[in-house]
Image: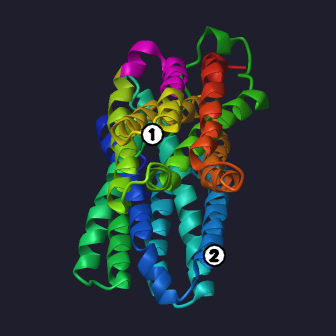
Amino acid sequence: MSALEVDVRPAPPRAARIATWLYFGLNGFAVGMWVVHIPSIEQRTGITHSTLGLLLLVLGGAAFTGMQVAGPLVDKLGQRRLVPAAGILLGIAIAGPGLATNWWTLGLTLILVGFGNGSIDVGMNAQAVVVERGYPRPIMAAFHAMWSIGGAIAAVIGAATLHAGVPTEVTLALSGLLCVMLSLAASRYLLESSEPEVDAEDAAGPRAKPSAKLVWALGGLAFGLMLSEGVTNDWAALHFRDILGTSVSTAAYAYGAFAVAMTVGRFLTDRVAAVVGPAAIVRWGAAMAAAGLTVVIVVPWVPVALIGWAVFGLGLAGGVPQLFTAAGNLDPRSSGALMARVVGLGYVGLLAGPAVIGGLTHWMPLNIAFVLPVVLCVLTFFGGPVLNSRK
């Protein structure tokens, strides 16, 4: 039996939950290790900022491609094969940027990193949907919180190794090895998707496939929320520095307030969703996010703006996990392919957000450009009831 020909006996839901946590964590860790080492890799390869920007677009395109390839493969090969394989690929690929010596070798390695990241993104979210079916309450948001925890761990370890003078290629190689080992260790505890018992409605005939309109609606909501998240990743600190006139060190608190609030919110979301339902989480979370970012736009005082960024992060925390769960449960027979579309559209939004805001700043101040994600959050509030639809 090969490393990927794992035992197919059902795993206890708790063991599968812990294993899925590990995959989310290692994905966040791998991405975080790449991000932390971007400056040193840029210096090693001798590329310019503009070339790096183009290569990041290549990485994003490869990730989107990986999502679209992995989605149908999840349904065809099974999650217990696809998810570990994607984790192993990402682990091997993450070592590549540390070995790159010029722009084209870095580009080749980033294609592998992006493809592996996109593949595991779809696979682990599909697995999370399956695991959640074995629990009496929602648990999806906590998985996404583990992604954030993995990224935070990477930031701490990366900063420590860089401070200690450990070569980037050594750090990334060891990080990749850790991802491979965790992928193999957790693979035996994953669950396969299974059809739910036939109910009275299904007994009358074959189950209808979910409409393309519904899938696109979920994808559109994911696009809007993740575009808003992407705006914060790249522009929150610059807002503090350029609009509020803070120092660089103080500016870092803007993104910190957002990230901490989002992580805490994701740990809290599941219990709230069990009471109020996923549509309410998406709708009122989007409304909270719109209110928080509006405060950021109009209030010129740093302490209040920090609160605004935190409220924005808290509002965005639970929406995307609910959308991914809804997509994965539309049709268990093709959950991977359906999630690939919704996750892929969300990822396009995450990539597009910073670029769109950057373009708008040529015609307006940065804080005014933030009106775009406010509008998208408002539209999400009105579009949230689509989660209650099955047609």
- Number of numbered discs: 2
Q: Which stretch appears magenta?
A: 272-288
Residue at the (60%, 44%) spot, across then down = 227
- Circle 2 sits on which residue? 50
Residue at the (26%, 63%) spot, across then down = 156
Residue, far top:
200
Q: Secondary structure at mark 2?
A: helix
Q: Amino acid at mark 1?
A: Pro
Quarter of the picture holding the C terminus: top right
Asked if the stretch drawn in magenta spans residue 246, the answer is no
- Circle 1 sits on which residue? 300
Asked if the stretch drawn in magenta spans residue 279, the answer is yes
Q: Nearer the viewer, residue 106 or 173?
A: 106
Task: Give residue 53's quadrant in the image.
Answer: bottom right
Residue at the (47%, 51%) spot, across then down = 80
Residue 15 horizontal side relative to residue 100, left or right: left
Q: Is residue 320 above or below residue 118?
A: above
Q: Position of residue 172 (x, y in %)?
A: 37, 76
Q: Position of residue 331 (x, y in %)?
A: 64, 30
Q: Position of residue 231 (x, y in %)?
A: 55, 48
Label 1, label 2: how far apart the Cα atoms are: 32 Å
Q: Mark 1 vs mark 2: give the one in front.
A: 1
Q: Decide whether the magenta segment is chiefly helix, strand or loop.
A: helix
Q: Is residue 182 above or below residue 58?
A: above
